[in-house]
Image (cartoon, coloured by chain):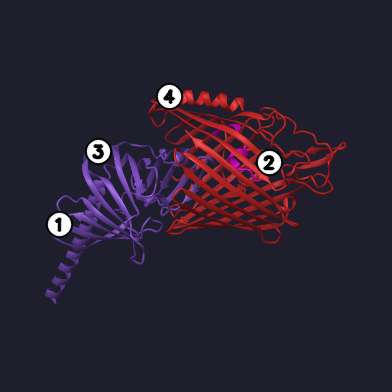
Amino acid sequence: MIKCLMVLLISINFSLYAQVNADLLLKKADDIRNPSDSFQMKVNVHSTGDGEDSEFEVFIKGKDKTLIKTILPRRDRGRNMLMLQENMWVFIPNLKREVRISLAQKLTGQTANGDLSRMRWHGDYEAKISKEDASSYELALTATKKGLTYDKITLWIDKKNNYPIKAEYLSLSGKKLKEAIFSDYKEMAGGMRPTKILIKDALNNKETSLLTIIEMKAKNFPDSFFVRENLQ
Amino acid sequence: MRNVLFFLVLILTITQLWADDTETKVNSEVGFRFARGSWGNNVRSKPYLKSELQKKFNDDFSSPLLDISFRASENLTSKNQNEEVELRSLRLSKKGTHYAFDWGLQTVNWSETFGFNILDIVNPRDWSEFVFEDLSWAQIPVWALKNSFFYGNFKFQLIYVPRAKNLIAPRSGSYFDPLSKLTTLPRKNYSSKKIFKDDEWGMRLEYLFDFGLDLSLISYEHFNRTPVYSLKEGGLVPTDPKLKSYALSFTYALNSFVLRGDTLQTSNQPYNSSDLLNHTKNDWQGIYGLDYTFENQLMIGGQYEFEQISKNKWGSIQLKKSIKDFDLQCLFFFGLNNDDRWVRPELTWHLPYAMTIRAYSDFIRGKSGGVLSPFDRKKLYAMNFNWMF
């Protein structure tokens, strides 16, 4: 009986450790992509088939406040977006009006609104280590909230340095929607960060969007920076 | 035309002068708007220039911002001199940790639904050109003090317009004149409004719930926003009383669905009647819609609409899809208890160098009962070209 209890306790302990470990890994991977709680970055997006690149100025506070200002293409200038929790609005410049949209709507090319506006996955997803090899962990992330950009994500993390390597964005049924590859790690905003993210459509690998982080800096913003009035 | 050219040169010069000033943004657009009706004449043939200058006084978040925009245009279809240079905004904006003040000439949009934008009651509209005119052209900016206060998910907005502006009604006997079938009696102009005496004011309370519902309550005291006339001293006099409106709007997004709704209640709303007497009724209007975005980014939206005075109900379906440089859109609007039908197919082509061509048509049917009966069997073909710089 005592042996049984001991085995049970050890099993529970191991499973808790694995759980904490996956959670920690996800947090570390998040910390590599996001320099601090509050920061801003300039992002260029080149999508196949689009004549012009898109450029955005992104202001992020925590994991649920983001303001995206569209700089290029010129025809979309002023088409700014605000994300509060899982809620998103876009400003339509010629109508001078903010319109509620969903996180899953496309920003440009293969990039969904949530790909830029919701950079932190820790807290939004439950993480489990699904596989492990000599060089990487494979984490299975399942959404703990409704209204997120993706229901499930499979994330590969480098064992050496916790760098995110690759992510697959999946539907609720597990169907692969998109793949993102994180590369070109460079010193930026006080740490090594992936400066290029290649997003590929799962059905058509030729449909890609390359996100290049041009600059990134930690900066503190008041909460009132993230209000609909600031979209104009 | 001279005005458009003069301001074009001026704006290009200013843009060049301030090209390196990161605190100053100048966005301009030059274009041409053309529309022809099936009744045989051109509705508009209009070159225009729009320009907007935003000047921040320093890099700080709380720095005051000056926003100036104007529009110069000329309707070449008009035989009379029809050049217009219009100041569209002159607004000083100041933001703090818990507030945002916007003072000056501005437009305020409150509607969450598409189409008739029933909650956009702060600005009167110019109905003179085309009844389905784009709202950005039809709204008349007003001098207003708009003060917003934020506390977490709660927002409170207070608006004061010291001197109301009159709406611009369709010309007498014109195609969109609501009384064209009833009478040709002479009409008097709207009386000019006096500062502080003829003021308008209101407020909006907004709360974003943690589960995603964004709910707003609105109260606004304003002059009548619809062109209504009554018979007086052998002529027709605009009915322009001050009214009180209360409104509720909401939006809610879940995955690829977005739910939105606007409800407006106006007490003693005047309306046009065949006896041309002054009639009023308490009016309720509502628009409730749902839109869904598919994985291939096809957007389908549906709306239900009602209006209490006319007892009309409508439905509408909107489809939107972008394919490379083209945006395709189609609106189907139909009466549920009347014969109103309106179809608007629309194509926008984004050309290099920020040039855009937009073409659309309006096909209207309305036998009786509905709001479209005066425009039965009419078609409008419109094309806009613009270049942003």
Please give left or right for residue A141 compared with residue B145 in the image: left
Q: Mark 3 points at which residue?
A: A189
Q: Is residue A164 visible to the viewer in this orientation of the structure?
A: yes
| Magenta-colored span | B132-146
- Whether discs 4 and 2 lie on one chain: the answer is yes
Label 3 – label 1 distance at C-alpha: 26 Å
- Whether discs 1 and 4 lie on one chain: the answer is no
Residue B25 is situated, as x and y percent measured from the top left of the image, at: 44, 30
Quadrant the N terminus of chain A occupies = bottom left
Graded by Cα atoms within 10 Å as few (under 14), some (14 to 19) or many (20 or more), the crowding at tag 1 reads few
Q: Name the residue under label 4.
A: B18
Q: Name the residue under label 1.
A: A135
- Residue that appears at 60% across and 49% down: B115
Judged from the image, the secondary structure of the residue bearing numbered disc 2 is strand
Q: Mark 2 points at which residue?
A: B42
Give amino acid for label 4: Trp
Pair 2/1: label in front: 2
Please give left or right for residue B212 compared with residue B199 in the image: left
Label 2 – label 3 distance at C-alpha: 58 Å
